[in-house]
Image (cartoon, rainbow, N blue to C red):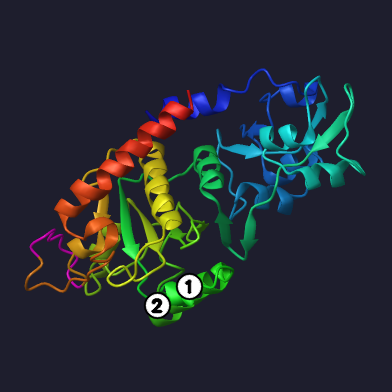
Amino acid sequence: MKKIVLLIFTVSFLLINLSPVQAQNNPRNIYEVKPGDYLWKIAQTYNMTVQDLKQINGLQTDLLLIGQKLRVSIDYKVVPGDTLWKLSQTFTSTVPLIKTANGLKSNTIYIGQKLKIPPKKLRMKGQFFLMTREEFKDWIFNQKFTRKVGKVQQHHTYQPSYQSFNGSNHFTLLQGMKDHHVTGMNWSDISQQLTTFPDGSVALGRPFNTPPEGSFGLLNEAVMHEIEKDAVAIENVGNFDAEHMTDEQRETIITVTALLMLKYDLQPTVDTITYHHWWDINTGKRVLDAGHGHAIKTCPGTGFFGGNSTDDAKNNFYPLVDRKMHEIWAAMQ
């Protein structure tokens, strides 16, 4: 399924009118990395900076993989029916960005006019990128990874909780989590690849090519690394033992999990979407619902999509993820 989804996502825009230099590779504002490519070379080709290229595409390092897709600036000739708003939507840009890039004083454009269209940049600070659900969908399908993933871990942060979030302090909370993980837990980086917030945004933290570190076998590091080697960890900001999840965050958790299932060609089961509650945090043993006598957490919360048992996941969460997978699939055809 993953290969089919990626193919549809790439070819569904083949008839857009672009300049010859763009058409040599991919006839949209997407460039597919080829052997011998590196960021500076691509940036020079499309009259961009390396930093802009990284911020537009959510790149945490300079590593590129063959087949990876990057959004780039393009030169476009206006055709009948075009408006700045339509162009901004088609090319993942904004009207102000297009106007600034072309020195436009108004929204009026004319047939045959040549425009430079830069993609919009993701919100970022340090290693962290903050995205909407749609931006994450674009990001995850354009990426190539070196690490095989077989399961998605669901956590709640407990602290920070909803009371810690003021609507604009995403990066402050992320840095606080990283500081705790590095200084308090002696881990190498922030533990989780992804963090969801009450406003529905999702942040990229730990690089996807690096396994998470977490409390799965705190007394046996070898076991912890074995558990984590094929995992992607999601921390959902909130204390879902006590707090009621917002509709926006709920939709983001479902959507992000569905996108990861599609990306890695997985189906929702107890083996592919796992709750922290199902594991002994000291030994790393997976106990599922037989946690009596083991060191277990309530994470991702007793109120996480109806509860934290395997039955709760099967009855309340997995069906929502499966339905969202089908919605995404249908929308891309």
Give the residue type that dot 1 points to.
Answer: Lys
* 1 or 2: mark nearer the eye: 1
Q: CA distance from mark 1 to mark 2?
A: 10 Å
Q: Which residue is mark 2?
A: 186
87 vs 260, left or right, is right
The residue drawn where x is 57% and y is 71% is 169
Q: Eyeballing the image, is 128 above or below 136?
A: below
Say the numbered circle drawn on residue 178.
1
The residue drawn where x is 41% and y is 55% is 247
Q: Eyeballing the image, is 264 above or below 329?
A: below
* Residue 176 appearing in the image: yes
The residue drawn where x is 37% and y is 62% is 245
The residue drawn where x is 56% and y is 27% is 10
Image-quadrant location for residue 258 = top left
Give the residue type that dot 2 points to.
Answer: Asn
Magenta stretch in the rendered image: 282-290
* Mark before the other along the chain sequence, 1 or 2: 1
**The residue tagged with tag 1: helix, strand or loop?**
helix
From the top left corner, tell me how far across and down residue 83 is, in percent.
79, 31
- Mark 2 neighbour class, 10 Å CA radius: few under 14, some 14 to 19, many 20 or more: few
Closer-to-camera residue (204/251): 251
Q: Are marks 1 and 2 in contact (CB under 8 Å)?
A: no
